[in-house]
Amino acid sequence: MKAFFYGFMTVAAAALTACGAADGVKLVDAKNFESTIDGKQVALYTLTSETGMTMQVTNFGGHVVSLWTPDKNGKMGDVVLGHNTLKEYTDYGGERFIGCVVGRYANRIAKGEFTIDSITYHVPVNNNGQSLHGGLKGVDQVVWDVDTVGTDMIQLSLLSPDGAEGYPGNLKITMTYALTPDNAFKITYRATTDKPTVVNLSHHGFFNLKGECAGTINDHLLTINADSITPVDSVLIPTGELMAVAGTPFDFNQATAIGDRVNDDHEQLRCGNGYDHNWVLRRNTADDVELAATVYEPTSGRVLEVLTNQPGLQFYGGNFFDGNGIGKCGDTFKYREAIALETQKFPDSPNQPQFPSTLLNPGEEYYHVCIYKFSVK
């Protein structure tokens, strides 16, 4: 498909911003995101791949606002939840983490406490007495610098200062979003620090392969390459054990409709009000990018493959959507109408020495790759 691009604006330096898109794509108006927050310019950028896949992203929290990809008939559809205006992201109601980067620590830290080198650090508790996704003002709630932007990629960076939300160290983060020729959305995170700290970044996109506002995701067929999960307590903090998925509603080694067992009488489903757990991925290597999960939606024919170099995958089934947020379609975000598939290390790893370490020391580099690859069948 042919894409058209025009328009220039200045953010840190003169940068090309895409203002057109593939046929059949309805773009969010970029003017709705032109603002200044904490003295930094916010904008909305449109990226388009060689195949016509189109994505809109804002440098406020790295939110992916829309993501258009074709169905089995070639019709373009927006497969992520998002909002039409910046104000809806800054004044969120109900669901804060719509399509953003989360951190410094994605997922939960028990009681908002962890210890490094005999020093105990305290970070904000914002979820049932636990710290979730970086605290009250995580990296999703700040304006990132725009380093480079082209037709199919954008590189954002952020200096999270020593003591931000209680975390030690000046953490320098670089994050690249790229649309690849094989119809994939690739995210690359790199980070360095000047003090020992903990880092666990992730993307919190919400997907519905039928399209935003197109109904339940319980009919999506899900496969997760994992033999166990990290079971949780009543406030969703891991117990420290591993639970085998065989013979339970958490076994997705064969493609299974998400809704088939979500209401089964199982303690872990009661804890999460459905699926909101970390799967321990079955990996062949320590650091290579490998297939973690596959989602197939029969009506549209869309297939989503999730690939990563991380050891864990948090699958969240939209259990807490309550109709407060308004999507780009003008309708509300409803119960179990989208899923999040967050590649990351494990929740509460700083307090669970048997889990993969999230410690980052000076002289080391945090490196994380997440790929959302789309196809049809």
Image (spheres, helix red, strand yellow):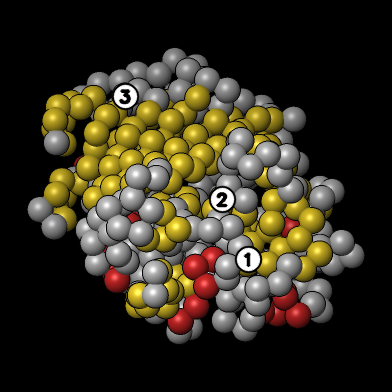
Mark earlier in primary sequence (3, 1): 3
- Secondary structure beneath dot 1 equals loop
- Disc 3 crowd, CA 10 A, few/some/many (<14, 14-19, 20+): some
Q: Which mark is residue 150?
A: 3
What amino acid is found at the position of numbered circle 3 in the picture?
Answer: Gly
Q: CA distance from mark 3 to mark 1?
A: 42 Å
Return the x and y of residue 210 as percentages of the image width and height.
Answer: 63, 45
Mark earlier in primary sequence (3, 2): 3
Residue where numbered disc 1 is placed: 354
Choose between 296 and 157: the one closer to the eye: 157
Return the x and y of residue 129 as percentages of the image width and height.
Answer: 45, 84
Q: Residue furthest front?
A: 117
Return the x and y of residue 340 as percentages of the image width and height.
Answer: 57, 55
Vertical relation: 23 (above or below) 55: above
Residue occupying image coordinates x 76% and y 80% = 267
- Secondary structure beneath dot 3 equals loop
Eye-nearest disc, 3 or 1: 1
What amino acid is found at the position of numbered circle 2 in the picture?
Answer: Thr
Eye-nearest disc, 1 or 2: 1
Q: Specify whether residue 335 is in view.
A: no
Mark earlier in primary sequence (1, 2): 2
Residue occupying image coordinates x 54% and y 66% = 349
Residue 94 in the figure: left or right of residue 75: left
Eye-nearest disc, 3 or 2: 2
Residue 39 in the figure: left or right of residue 124: left
Marks 3 and 1 close (CB-CB < 8 Å): no
- Secondary structure beneath dot 2 equals strand
Residue where numbered disc 2 is placed: 343
Residue occupying image coordinates x 35% and y 23% = 151
Q: Residue furthest left?
A: 39
Specify the quadrant of the image occupied by residue 303.
top right
Residue occupying image coordinates x 33% and y 63% = 138
